[in-house]
Image (cartoon, helix red, strand yellow):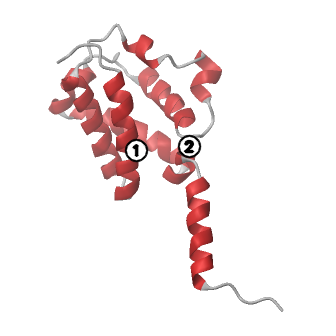
């Protein structure tokens, strides 16, 4: 005779399922990722604090929006759209023409943090994403300041 599952078993199963979901799934898939990228670039255009990184992008910035969306899709465990279209990201090499120091890194991170917060993502998810974004953004620096 089988025994009914205890509430803890159900909670453990739910937590395990959440741990196996990709970041792409956790943030809400294609639609929510597109919203995040659009909010990020909208803030970059609107906020004077982000003028430094905004100046590095073409106007209009549709191609930059699309490339970030495609890159983040694969980076978060969703479809590898960037690789399918452009090949290996080679992030550092693609960004070498731009002077990226701590100021630019921090502008990018603040802009992304604001976009995540504006879209109402859970604090723990925002923290997890920002820790990963920091590692990548810091690696992109090609000058000291």
Task: List the residue tagged with mark 2.
Answer: 30
Figure quadrant of residue 111 = top left
22 vs 82, nearest the viewer: 22
The residue lying at 35 percent from left, 21 percent from top is: 140
Alpha carbons under labels 2 and 1: distance apart? 17 Å
The residue lying at 36 percent from left, 10 percent from top is: 96
Residue 109: % across, % down: 29, 35
Query: Can the viewer see residue 121 in this picture?
Result: no
Q: Nearer the viewer, mark 2 or mark 1?
A: 1
Q: Does residue 93 appear left or right of residue 88 in this picture?
A: left
- First along the sequence among labels 2 and 1: 2
Query: Looking at the image, is 96 positioned above or below residue 71?
Result: above
Q: Residues within 10 Å of mark 2 (few under 14, many from 20)?
A: some
Figure quadrant of residue 92 = top left
Q: Secondary structure at mark 1?
A: helix
Residue 76: % across, % down: 53, 40
Query: Can the viewer see residue 48 in this picture?
Result: yes
Q: Which mark, residue 129? A: 1
Q: Does residue 24 appear left or right of residue 51 in this picture?
A: right
Q: Residue furthest bottom?
A: 1
Q: Which mark, residue 28? A: none
The residue lying at 44 percent from left, 43 percent from top is: 35
Q: Does residue 69 appear left or right of residue 9 in this picture?
A: left
115 vs 26, nearest the viewer: 26
The residue lying at 46 percent from left, 28 percent from top is: 68
Residue 113: % across, % down: 30, 43
Residue 98: % across, % down: 30, 11
């Amino acid at each position: 005779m089988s025994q009914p599952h205890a509430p803890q078993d159900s909670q453990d199963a739910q937590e395990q399922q959440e741990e196996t979901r990709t970041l792409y799934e956790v943030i809400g898939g294609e639609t929510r990722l597109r919203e995040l990228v659009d909010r990020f670039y909208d803030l970059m255009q609107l906020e004077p604090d982000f003028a430094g990184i905004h100046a590095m992008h073409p106007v209009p910035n549709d191609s930059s929006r699309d490339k970030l969306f495609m890159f983040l899709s694969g980076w978060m465990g969703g479809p590898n759209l960037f690789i399918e279209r452009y090949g290996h990201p080679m992030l550092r090499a693609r960004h070498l023409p731009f002077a990226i120091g701590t100021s630019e890194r921090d502008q990018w991170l603040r802009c992304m943090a604001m976009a995540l917060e504006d879209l109402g993502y859970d604090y723990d998810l925002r923290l997890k994403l920002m820790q990963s974004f920091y590692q990548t953004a810091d690696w992109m620096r090609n000058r000291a300041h």
